[in-house]
Amino acid sequence: MKQLLLSLSLLVSATTWAQPVMLSDAVPGANGCDPSMFTGMNGKVYFAADDGINGQELWVYDGSTCSMVYNINPSGDALGAIKQMVELNGKLYFSADDGTNGRELWVYDGINPPSIAADIEPGAGTGGVGMLAVLNNKIYFGALTTTTGGELWSYDPATNTAAVLSSLAPGADPSGVYEVGVFNGKVYFSGTTPGEGFELRVYDPANNTSSMVADINSGAPGSSPFNFMTANNKLYFFAKTINYGIELYSYSGSGIPTRLTDINPGAGDSGFDTPLPFNFMAYMNNNIYFCAQNATSGYQMFKYDIATNTTNLFYTINPSGPGTNAYYVSYANKLYFGAGNPTIGFELWTFDGTNPPAMIYDINPGSGSGGPSHMTVIGNTLYFGADNGISGDEPYKLYDPATSVATVNSNIKMALHPNPASTDAYIDMELEQAQKLSVTIADIAGKVLSNTSNKYDNGYHTISVPCGQWAQGTYIYQVKDEAGHLLHTGKLIKK
């Protein structure tokens, strides 16, 4: 549930948090457990953590306590450096190494011990399973074998089968896949061949073909596209060329990608020179906010205005030198991110779209860094890792009271996003128990445009609201139980 929550969230619990709350001191003392990969499944939050004894393993937060799910690799780190998990149909999928079978695709159903879903490279050899993406009830990922090299793969839980989808290089010739994302019903990935380097590529499930979208930086170095983000019906990413360095690009799904910025003119990099597994940008109110540097500013907060196709240095995190900002996420109609300078350290900041960005809480008081990282919205709560200076890097949560637009006596948590919406909106629900619900959306005059009724199991669900053909304006949505009792109501803005 890694989609942007830009919007309207509904809190149905009486609990509110005015400040970040540490979920658990998994490793007593100053070392911390280094949490990452926060992912929701069946009403619980799963993440990777290291308790200092068992290495990086799968952990769970059940709403009150944190605990290790299973020691997958008794001799070392099971989850390692590729920090990503995905949920599909009530199961958790992730890349893990049990110390015997190499790094493969694993699955956890919330009840039985985690197990290998697909052994890409049988035996002790590693399949090198990396970043994951979900499309049409299948999981897509990059993997490496001694016979195929590094290629794009898919796993179908319905048939319990894995298949190689791309052919970047013949046989075991050097090739590889790094980032994987989904946009407009296709799978996009950063793939390399011996002659072309890492470039933006696409796999189309409709005709089972893969191809290079564009040779953004011709030759072996490649452009190394990274940090994929979908917004405003486009795919956004960073890429590097010989002439422009690292800059922001967009791709509409046809033609070639468009370079949007030249923040650091010439060949100088405006972004980090090494792709890193966390978000440098986020979308809010038709703008893209991101971390970048020009020739004089050092890393600061920049804004790309989609409507005017212009970029500017939006906010100087550190007026006297380089600032740091990363882990961007849109939540509760605000932008949350980590930022800092030598005076306050790296702390949790927010921007509401109107007032200047500001630190909202000094997790590690003084010049020490709280280091908020891996920020992820699950349901109507923001989860992240942070260090208060005493307990080390531990898991935290934050609830923004501004998300509450309706409070009722219900066991449902909801989030509607994006809001405003241009093509599709999504209603994320977290149910504590199975029940039948109806969702009705009507215009201001009361004309019903959408009415669905389904039985939902406990846990997380997403309802798609295709609103691309609707007129601009305000719409009202209502959620009712099987007896017709109104549980929630709110507004959806169509732009």
Image: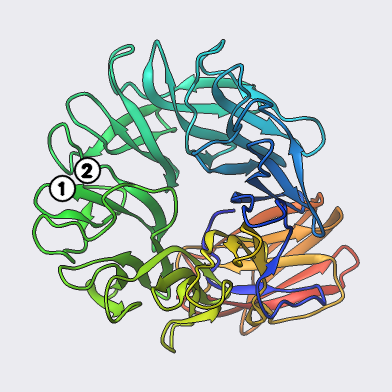
The answer, for residue 284, to whether it is visible in the render is: yes
Count the marks: how many? 2
Query: How dense is the environment of label 2, judged by Cα within 10 Å: few (below 14), some, or many (20 and up)?
Result: many
Of residues 460 and 82, the one nearer the viewer is 82
Query: How dense is the environment of label 1, judged by Cα within 10 Å: few (below 14), some, or many (20 and up)?
Result: some
Percent x, y of residue 165: 41, 24
- At 74% from the left edge and 58% from the top edge, which residue is drawn? 24
- At 56% from the left edge and 34% from the top edge, which residue is drawn? 138
Drawn side of residue 206 relative to residue 2, left or right: left
Query: Looking at the rendered structure, which numbered label has been put on residue 223?
Result: 2
Amino acid type assigned to the residue bearing label 1 in the image: Thr
SS under mark 1: strand
Residue farthest bottom in this picture: 355
Name which quarter of the figure residue 98 lies in. top right
Of residues 478 and 203, the one nearer the viewer is 203
Drawn side of residue 208 relative to residue 124, left or right: left
Of residues 13 and 298, the one nearer the viewer is 298
Drawn side of residue 169 relative to residue 414, left or right: left
327 is higher (above) or lower (below) than 492: above
- At 29% from the left edge and 75% from the top edge, which residue is drawn? 307
Query: Looking at the rendered structure, which numbered label has been put on residue 241?
Result: 1
SS under mark 2: loop
- At 88% from the left edge and 62% from the top edge, which residue is drawn? 482
146 is higher (above) or lower (below) than 78: above
Amino acid type assigned to the residue bearing label 2 in the image: Ser
Q: Are marks 2 and 1 in contact (CB under 8 Å)?
A: yes
Of residues 166 and 331, the one nearer the viewer is 331
